[in-house]
Amino acid sequence: MSEQQHQEIAIIMLAAGASSRMMSADKLLEKIDDIPLLRHATTQALTSRAQTVIVVLRPRDGERRACLHGTKARLVKNPDWQNGMASSIATGLRACPPSITAAVIALADMPDIKSQDYNCLIDTFKASSEESIIRASSQSGRHGHPVLFPRRYFPALQGLHGDRGAKEILHKHADQVIAVCLHADSALTDLDTPEDWQAYRQRQPDN
C-alpha cells in the first residue's frame, strides 16, 4: 500500500453558527429520528473511517455541548464565531493533531450526510494525488458539502475571513477539485429555517 493510503484524516464539524434564521429555535438541536441534529451529524462522522472528529462550538454553548456528551468527538470553542465560518474553519484546523494530513470540512446542519459519504471522500483522496481537493456533489452535478482538503491547503484555509467559507480556495484551485457524487441531494440539503425543517420532515418515509 502507498504512503497516501496510510494518511490520517480529520473531520471538522462546523457547529458554531447562530441559527439566526430559525427564529427562537436552535436548528442543531432539532430532532432527526429523536436525536438532536448535531449529535446525529457527529455520530455519522465518528462512524466513518476518519481518525479524528473535531466539533467547533461557540463559547458557553451548553446545550449543544450537552447533546454531544459521551461521544468521542473533540469539542473546541471558537471565541471569534461571530466573525463567520472562516474563523470556525481556522479553529478546527488549529485543533488537528500534527499527524493529520487532510481535513474534511463538514456542516452540522446537513442531515443526509452519512458515514459512507465521508468514506467516499476519504477513499477518493487516498486514490488520488496529495494535491487533490475532494468535493461532494449532487447527482445533478451541483457542488456541495462536505469538502476534503489536503494539509497543503491548511495555511490558505486559516487565512480566510468572513462567512464565505472556502469558496475562493476552491475557485483558485479548481483544476485540483475532484467531484464525488453522493446519493440524491444529500450534498446540498441543509436545514436553516423552520420552513426547511417542515419540508424535510414531510419528505421522510413516515409522513
Image (spheres, rainbow, N blue to C red):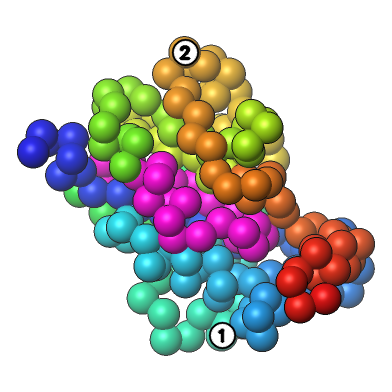
Does residue 34 lie above or below 164 as drawn?
below
Can residue 173 be seen from the camera position used here?
yes
Q: Quadrant of residue 24?
A: bottom right
Q: Nearer the viewer, mark 2 or mark 1?
A: 2
Residue nearer the viewer, 15 or 106: 106
Residue at horizontal 63 percent and vertical 37 percent from the top: 139
Label 2 CA crowd tier, 10 Å (few <14, some 14–19, many 20+): few
The amino acid beneath tag 2 is Asp
Callout 1 amino acid: Ala
Residue at 47% in and 71% down: 43
Q: Which residue is mark 2?
A: 175
Camera-nearest residue between 206 and 74? 206
- Is residue 108 in the magenta section? yes
Q: Is 13 drawn above or below residue 61 in the view shown?
A: above
Location of mark 1 (residue): 66
Residue under the image location 43 percent in, 51 percent down: 118
Kind of element beneath mark 1? helix
Identify whether 42 is placed above or below 105.
below
Q: CA distance from mark 2 to mark 1?
A: 41 Å
Asked if labels 1 and 2 touch by Cβ distance under 8 angstroms, the answer is no
Badge 1: few (under 14), some or many (20 or more) residues near its Cα, within 10 Å?
Answer: few
What is the secondary structure assignment of the residue under circle 2? helix
Left or right: 6 in relation to 128: left
Work out which residue is located at the far left of the displayed protein and give it: 1
User: Residue 23: where, in percent of width, then height?
Assistant: 91, 68
Locate the C terminus and report the quarter of the image it occupies: bottom right
Q: Which residues are magenta?
A: 100-122
In the image, what residue occupies the spot 56% across and 73% down?
A: 40
Q: Quadrant of the N terminus?
A: top left
